Image: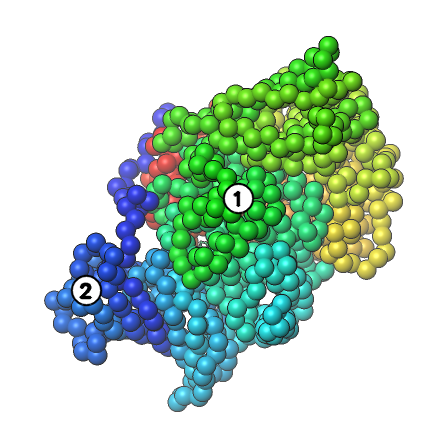
Amino acid sequence: MQPAIAPTTAIEPTRLCDYRPPAFWVDRVDLQVELFDSHTVVTATLALRRNRQSAQSLDLVLDGAAELQLLAIHCDGEPLSPDRYQRQGETLTISGLGESAELTTRVQLDPAANTRLEGLYRSRAMYCTQCEAEGFRHITFYPDRPDVLAEFRCRISADKQAFPVLLSNGNCVASGDLDAGRHFVEWHDPFKKPCYLFALVAGDLAVVSDSFVTASGRTVALKIYVEEKDLDKCDHAMRSLKAAMAWDQQRYGREYDLDLFMIVAVDDFNMGAMENKGLNIFNTSAVLANPSIATDATFQRIESIVAHEYFHNWSGNRVTCRDWFQLSLKEGFTVFRDAQFSADMNAAVVKRIEDVSLLRTLQFAEDAGPLAHPVQPQSYVEINNFYTVTVYEKGAEVVGMLHTLLGERAFRQATDRYFEHYDGQAVTIEEFVSAMEEASGRDLQQFRQWYWQAGTPELDCHWQWHEATGMVTLTVAQQCPPTPGQATKVPFHIPIRVGMVGANGDLALSADGATEQLLELTARRQQWQFGPFTEPPVPSLLRGFSAPVKLHVDYSEEQLLHLAGCDSDGFNRWEAMQQLYQLAVHAALAQGADSPVSAPLVARFEQLLNDPHLDAATAAQLLTLPGESELFERWQPIDPEKITAARNSVRAQLVAASAESVRSRYYALQSDQPYAPSSDQIGQRALKNTLLRYLCEFAQGEPLAVAQFQQADNMTDQLAALTALLAAADSSAAGAALSSFYQQWRHEPLALNLWFRAQATAPGVEPQQLRALLQHPDFSLTNPNKVRSVVAAYAMANLGQFHRRDGSGYQLLAEVIIQLNAINPQIAARLVVPLTAWAKFAEPYRTAMRENLAAIGNCGELAKDLAEQVEKSLGG
Ligand code: TRP
Ligand code: ZN
């Protein structure tokens, strides 16, 4: 049966080529926000000035969501007559304005009914805002676009007892008591900003305070606001914040500019965190941690998100985006900066491996599917759908390639120039790239294709050793598959770091003695000569993953084993191991899951387990096979059952053959040091818990996991034991561990999310168990963290179960998405992504995925977030 195609709702996209400067600027905005139990009143006074450069109509067009109840409208102190303004859809048009005007609107809102979590909403007992990308129009009428920069004042009033803390951007300039138990606080932000950086918080919050002295000697007050019960979970975020402030001064010469920097933790939040000027708002999951409720991964995630949001103060706030097509200007650059920071704070190679794995699993899949788009998209229906791994992670890779091509010195000169020249302005990616060109004197015209063309370039590499001359010829050809709207591509400018590995390690590449070279591939096909060498070397290509491409090289198993052992590049040693695992999975796919894994790989696996010189974090990475989703990208049409079985067969054999080494290394990694989220300890726990999982799955490790579960004094070890038990061949101990975990943590929402996630990602979980979790009293569809812990975890991190032949996994996802469409369209649209890849799958998966996608399309009134995703993935 052919599924019905979703009705094509005519949704007009916004296009980059239609960008026009605004007809009016807003110089100052005065907001008065009155919070009442039943409703909120927002009075906004805008100081408007006509933009002489604009060819726009004479009218002022303000954005304002349909649910805003307009109570009053005044212009220059007089009520505006009804024939001078008109509401239509999401806009308010005002005619007859002169060169400048003072416009006042008063609107009424219902934040308690706002489950979309954009604009002003309630989360538990507090009020907070989320204005990026287009949330401000849900608060008041305003030119809701990032190129309108205004000076904000905000006066908040509320019941003093229920909401003693009232916060907004900038500095607190006044406060006082009002009638009827109410009070007010007034804030002024001296830095002009776009409205997406506006924030407001009201609540009964406790605070952790600290301070930071900047390079120029100013003291900045640092405050983290949380619910009283969470005061014991702020230390790590505060430490990370201070480290980030110091790092940005040292590495980029960027100092913080206000005297106050605040972070507020909220439980209901669509993303990780938000860089509002001087008042960052964080998902509790991205800020709260202590050893008993947070895992090592959470500690590291917090460090990088705190830094990311802080770094936005320069890359995003002081220099902001002209329009949302420039999103990667701030996000790609800031992710690059936070990755550099994390690499400096932790094990750099491990950080790189994690980032590349994420890129390969999520971004390469996005680039190869119906939602593929360039780092700088050309059009969008719903901008929220473009906060993607392409804009963030591929965008960061593109900045990383600029760093590689220019070198640290010229790159830093370019960023200095960019920050100084465009301070206080809303600019484009083009301005960023030109700053790079000007500082380095390089021509980056062809490099710009990385921003314009979607798709992952594929490189075919061949080398030849000429025995007579001792020279090696390396040939590299590039091509990029078509993506929606881009049938053909021009060549990319691709930096390729290479070395040549001989019997005893790196060889000199030429007479100058250097052992590494940066090749720049600009043509479709290029050749390079290296040598002379006295022995045939093995090329080590794309070191450090110097470009976000797929590399095809015909290495033999022997050559890969050699690279895995001798390459001086840590990333490429890991990469060689990954290739070896892929060969083994491939053999299991081709010859049946019970075909034996090659003896040299088995030996290498055991050798890694016993290598005393290898640091534990790296060992954990080297002993882990590529994930299912990475393997899915390799063998299409995808047969999930076969790939999962092949992968597990290889894992089982490797562990069975070295079970004693796995076990003794596990014992050797026991430690009685007090917990610290240090990179040494994190690495050791990572290795220990990788081994525990192997033992449980393949070597009767259950008693070890039970013991670890009971004795753990930190969440990393406790959760690892729980998930190992859930994955164990004999899972009889898992039930008891689950209920004891629940009893212990039922009052800690963040720990409870881990409990939900562990079950949703358990290898044996059935759809009806998922349904039971969705009905659990502690589950809630209105809380994105809960939805992510159960539904996103199942559909994105439990591929073996989600892709069931009977399609019941897809159906479950579709049902949740349809419910969420009416509650929180932004989250609904993110959850649909796993279904959009239907065309890459084999039958019967393919048809089942497509049918469920169509069912979502036919469910009634789709929010445009979801409509855009469904239409793009069915339409093509
Ligand atoms: N600018 C935020 C960041 O990357 C992203 C963000 C936070 C966001 N909340 C959002 C984007 C809500 C869209 C909608 O740091
Ligand atoms: Zn960001």
Q: Which residue lies furthest to the left in this view?
A: 83
Q: Where is residue 117 in the image (x, y as percent from the top left)?
A: 43, 59
Quadrant housing the C terminus: top left
Residue drawn at x 61%, y 22% as measured from the top left: 528
Pointer 2 residue: 94
- Left or right of 347? Residue 792 is left
CA neighbours of label 2 inside 10 A, class few (<14), some (14 to 19), many (20+): many
Q: Work out how far the residue at label 1 is from the one at label 2, CA to CA, in angstroms.
A: 48 Å
Asked whether residue 408 is in view, the answer is yes
Please state which of the two labelled residues, at mark 1 or mark 2, is closer to the viewer.
1
Q: Which is nearer the eye, 52 or 819? A: 52
Q: Position of residue 132 (x, y in %)?
A: 42, 57
Q: What element carries label 2?
A: strand
CA neighbours of label 1 inside 10 A, class few (<14), some (14 to 19), many (20+): some
Which of disc 2 and disc 1 is earlier in sequence?
A: 2
* Kind of residue at disc 1: Ser
Q: Which is nearer the eye, 747 or 427? A: 427
Residue drawn at x 52%, y 68% as measured from the top left: 257
Asked whether residue 593 is in view, the answer is no
Q: Which is nearer the eye, 762 or 314? A: 314
Residue 868 image-quadrant placement: top left
Pointer 1 residue: 440
* Kind of residue at disc 2: Ile
Q: Does the residue labelled 2 lie within 8 Å of ligand 1?
A: no
Q: Is residue 421 above or below residue 511?
A: below
